[in-house]
Image (spheres, grey):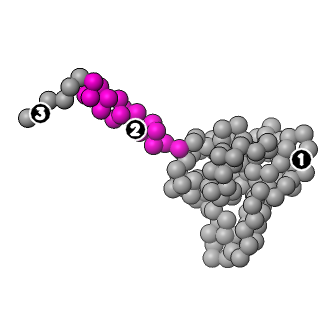
Amino acid sequence: MKRMTLPLATGALLAMLTAPALAEGPVVEMYQDPNCGCCGAWAEHLEAEGFTVERHKTREMRAIKIEQGLTPELASCHTAMVDGYVIEGHVPAADIHRLLEERPDVAGLAVPGMPHGSPGMETGRVDDYRVLGWHRDDRTPEIFNEYTH
């Protein structure tokens, strides 16, 4: 039986201890109404794409949206925060990954309303929708991505 040298054993142990932490993706803090089911489906979509989602059920959604600078035109059912950005509604994980990679100067991304076919809203019907970015000082949204079918 071969014995590992101390530096190799220490390195292997360090790799084993840190591997789970490295495997976890960015942490998304999601706030949702306790009675909403599509929010959980959106969280599952994010988890399947490598995010860690911490879910918080609250009846204070309006206050959270106001605190995060969301206008009624940007609003959807759930509000989330990830790495300093606000994520409103059924934003696809790919767009959040792109946001975190490119780091544009926006407050966050929003998919207003609850369009059918967006992540968490797979109902059999598929609507066209836009992912919008906005700035806190100028809330005029800009198109970050479009989904047309």
Amino acid type assigned to the residue bearing label 3 in the image: Lys
Between 113 and 61, the one nearer to me in the picture:
113
Q: Secondary structure at mark 1?
A: loop
Q: Which mark is residue 2?
A: 3
Residue at (86% x, 40% y) in the render: 136
Give the label, 1 or 2, closer to the camera. Answer: 2
Gap between marks 3 and 1, in whole Å? 64 Å
Above-or-below relation of 45 to 117: above
Please tell me how crowded label 2 is: few (under 14), some (14-19), or many (20+) other residues with Cα within 10 Å.
few
Between 146 and 67, the one nearer to me in the picture:
146
Going from the N terminus, do you reach mark 3 or mark 1 first?
3
Gap between marks 1 and 2, in whole Å? 40 Å
Quarter of the figure with residue 114? bottom right
Q: Which mark is residue 139?
A: 1
Residue 19 is inside the magenta segment: yes
Quarter of the figure with residue 105? top right
Q: Locate residue 131, reporting x and y percent.
A: 76, 59
Q: Secondary structure at mark 3?
A: loop
Residue 13 is inside the magenta segment: yes
How many marks do you count on the picture?
Answer: 3
Amino acid type assigned to the residue bearing label 2 in the image: Ala
Residue at (25% x, 28% y) in the render: 9
Q: State which region is magenta.
A: 7-25
Q: Which mark is residue 19?
A: 2
